[in-house]
Amino acid sequence: MKTLYLLVPLAPLAGAIVAGLFGRAIGRAGAHWVTILSVLVSFIASCVIFADVLAGNTFNGSVYTWLTSGETRLEIGFLIDRLSALMMVVVTFVSLMVHVYTIGYMAGDPGYQRFFSYLSLFTFSMLMLVMANNFLQLFFGWEAVGLVSYLLIGFWYTRPSATYANLKAFLVNRVGDFGFLLGIALILSHFGTLSYAPVFDQAPGLAAGGGLPVTLICLLLFVGAMGKSAQFPLHVWLPDSMEGPTPISALIHAATMVTAGIFMVARMSPLFELSQAALSTVMVIGAITALSMGMVALTQFDIKRVVAYSTLSQLGYMTAALGASAYSAAMFHLMTHAFFKAVLFLAAGSVIIAMHHEQDMRRMGGLKRYMPWTYWTLLIGAIASAGIPPFAGFFSKDAIIEAVRLSGTPGAAFAYACVLACVFVTAAYTFRMVFMAFHGEPRFDPKHPPHESPAVVTIPLVLLAIPSVAAGWWIGSLVFGDYFGASILVRPEHASLAKMAADYRGLGGFILHGLATPPFWLAVAGIAAAWYLYRVRTDLPGRIARAFGPLYALVERKYGFDELYSIVFAAGARAIGTGFWKGGDQGTIDGFMVNGSARLVGWFSGVVRLLQSGLVYWYAFMMIFGVCAMYALVKYRVFG
Amino acid sequence: MKLLTLAIWVPILAGLLVLATGGDKNAPLQRAIALVGAIFGFLVTIPLYTGFNPAQAGMQFVERVSWIPQFNVFYHLGVDGISVLFLLLNAFITVLVVIAGWTVIQSRVAQYMAAFLIMSGLLNGVFSALDGLLFYVFFEATLIPMFVIIGIWGGPNRVYAALKFFLYTLFGSLLMLVALLYLYNKSGGSFAIMDWWKLPLPLGAQLLLFFGLLFAFAVKVPMWPVHTWLPDAHTEAPTGGSVVLAAIMLKLGAYGFVRFTLPILPDASRELAWLMIALSLIAVVYIGLVALVQTDMKRLIAYSSISHMGFVTLGFFIFNSWGVEGALVQMISHGFISAAMFLCVGVMYDRMHSRNIADYGGVVNTMPKFAALMMLFAMANSGLPATSGFVGEFMVIMGAMKANFWVAFAAATTLVFGAAYTLWMYKRVIFGAVANDHVAKLEDLNGRETLVLGLLAFAVLAMGIWPLPFTEVMHASVNELLRHVALPKL
């Protein structure tokens, strides 16, 4: 089995290396075949492992020793349990679909081989992250996915906006990683190891001696999650990451990489459970992200940005669920979201190609007729996203909202209000997109009507649309059952999901119960509102925007965080740097001390030079003066 | 086999041989001799690693011959787990420098090659000397070839830079000489460094000696605020000079701390650790911010070097195995990465004759292979995991956390600053549309450049993916060192 574990990450790595280094030799088709086959191998192996894990086998062992220092041994190793196996299947499946889709999307691009190489490299990095059995390797994967994300956002490197966005993404993520690394360092200094199992074993002992270290560790780790999973206020990089080609927006910035933070917190549940303060923070941050970013999505016209803000908002849901100790619900939503958000992104991408790289929804409309496959798959994704039964998103989102409602963690009431309001907002912005782009009168140039995308694009859409519907039906075992078993730990005082599980009466019962609770009706109301505003009274949105003038502008400008950060951090750091350079290095150190001491030497030698005038009478005078002075000193016994 | 003698004298003799071949008309022969000498010099250092016994903490491959009997001075050589890797690194870098200067240097080829070979031998001498005076001689002698390299093959402002470099470091080492002579007297007439380790010293004397040595070593590292010679020296030096300066010469100061300051003056070291930690953190943060606003690529990388060397001094003065080993790893890794970064700038400078960031833009369009390699080195410079740049910083931060949360906090800011200044430069130089006609005419790497950068890329990745072979030779010696530091010797 260990060979198979190794095969899962190493196959995509091999594919990436071949496509990256020998891309020109193997050609375009060679590049996509080698990477797709390698990811297919990885997917199949993941499925086999998944079946094996379901049969009750887990694995926790090392591959090689990375480093030793003092008493500590740091290893690269795998932890294969139900949590990681689920992630492996999701990651490899979505990655495989995106690989296939890319054949169509990137068909004419000169960087074709490079793109496939990056995609496979990303898959490798993400798998290493997911399969890690220690914090070191987790950090490796964590930074490696950040690197590939950087490379892919800047894939079209001649565009200034792309290279701005990728630098921004990398640096904001680095701020998160700064906290993450400090958290890891704290873990090492308290526990003397970075392997999960012994850390989790020792953590209750540390917490018993005072909660502060554990809370600090959890908060620092969560700072990392806020960077990677784009939580408020480190969310600013994700919308700009849409500068990258759409397949990677689907794979990295929706389905997999941005969920790494969610996965990480779920993995660390034995730590987070020990700190009420950390859980509270997580929940509140998640709730704020969910609602505030959903609001922004309502104001955007770029179809990809709408989906991007939707992703931010959905990540907020997952984070809020983590804070409510509903780790399995968060993981469940992570999975369903991976499918329906990948559909939304890839369908949006299909629209973008068909529209000749037009992304503004104000220049779309009526696309339903031209692109039926794209329309229907996107609609499925939209319904799932809005949370209408029996689509996948309904189950996962309802479980989260209910868990937050039942949670006793401080801040739960605020979080519940946010996530509940967000249901309406989600449905509204999702169907706003559907109606604006696909219904109504065409607003594009009729001389260049759009065409449905080729099969390499539509087949992945269909294959992803299926789990967007069906994945939710798994709620019984995944959330309310014991699927995650020992891989997620929930302390009894946080067991809101267990309370729900006690009332769980099968899928039908869950749906019926859902129909009687506010979230469902809020979702319906959201869709109705979108229909009314964008199909019936299309003049209203503009009037609303004008009526709320400054408030609307604030939301549309994403609450001004970009401007704030750019002034405070980017310009601030440059100003301080210039101050240190000109004032410190050049002014004080070089100007005063270094060149100053050179001048001092020069001045001193100038003075001494005056004495050596070369004139005999001057020397004679000095001699007489000296003799007199010496006589005087002796005579008056100056030296005692 | 006297391996250490070979490691020192093979390159020096090869250098003298090159000098003996006369003027530039023999340039092809001179290059060939230099290359053979450099490779042979590298080969003789390999048995130092393969034959090294990592379980043994003391000196290995020891040679001891009387040199100046009147003053009890010995030609006394030996390496332990702390120093052995630097001989390999130095010999490796020398090979690369010879290859990198192959066609770039067209005038005074013999002198150029000889200067590097002789310097390589002298540097090996510094890392293996166990006699205080011998160490001093090697330490000072390395200044001469570097002074010549900057002064002759340097840029337009080379004379100012060379003089600044020379005077700064010479002034520092004079204080060191005084300290060494004091130790000689106190120990009853012994220059043996190992004897000094056992020498009891009152705290007052230790503090004075500490500052005497500090100035010499701090200038070399360089530590804030005696660092301002480095950006000037780097910008004016030819590529090869910058490479050796950053990769090896800066390590002499840091090496001095572990060989002299920590074991000989443990009480003063512990007493003044706060000062060293503070200066190191200033180097990380202050210099990181200064690097951000540089407009000259070489100057930027020079500042980045200072910032990275801050991790080295920080690691030494937190007195645990993570810190010290991390610092040593950082020294080696910085040898690879800074060499690679300066070579990358050199590659562009050779084509465009400009170091100004503003003169570039869109280089990736014409030099994709170069852009890919430089991306790797830029990421390594930003401390990305799976590159060598991560290992040292990671270990030092881990060690710092054991000492104090806020020290680790300040040190970890390099994650942001390091990425910011490196990748911002990369973005402006490499990404974007072709900025001007000069960029449009650029040609991608030739075979020789690919070889040099490829070897460094391999080293950077290998050390990042599997640092164990680098650290396991250190353990015994580092533990021994830490034991020395912990023992009061008042």
Image (cartoon, grey):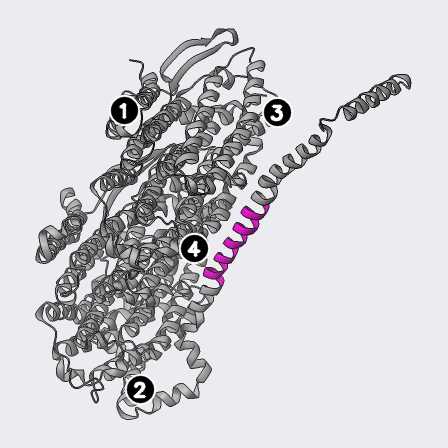
Q: Is residue B167 above or below residue B157?
A: above
Q: Is residue A272 visible?
A: no
Residue B466 screen position, x and y as percent? 27, 37
Tell me the residue that label 3 is attached to: B203
Chain letter of the residue carrying label 1? B
Tell me the residue that label 1 is attached to: B37
Looking at marks 2 and 4 on the same chain, the residue that comes earlier in the sequence is marked by 4
Tell me the residue that label 2 is attached to: A529
Are the residues flagged by discs 3 and 1 from a single subunit?
Answer: yes
Q: Secondary structure at mark 1?
A: helix
Residue B132 screen position, x and y as percent? 48, 18
Can you say which quadrant of the picture contains the N terminus of chain B? top left
Q: Secondary structure at mark 2?
A: helix
The residue under the point 49% across, 63% down is A568
- Magenta: main secondary structure equals helix
Q: Is residue B318 left or right of residue A589?
A: left
Calculate the distance from the C-alpha at mark 3 to the C-alpha at mark 2.
80 Å
| Number of other residues with Cα within 10 Å of mark 3, as a class: few under 14, some 14 to 19, many 20 or more | some
Kind of residue indicated by mark 3: Leu
Kind of residue indicated by mark 2: Ala
| Circle count | 4
Calculate the distance from the C-alpha at mark 2 to the C-alpha at mark 4.
39 Å
Tag nearer the camera, 2 or 1? 1
Are the residues flagged by discs 3 and 4 from a single subunit?
Answer: no
Question: Which sits in the foreground, A287 or B9?
Answer: B9
The range drawn in magenta is A568-588
Tag nearer the camera, 3 or 1? 1
Calculate the distance from the C-alpha at mark 1 to the C-alpha at mark 4.
56 Å
Tell me the residue that label 4 is attached to: A219
State the residue lying farthest toward the right. A636
State the residue lying farthest toward the top. B70
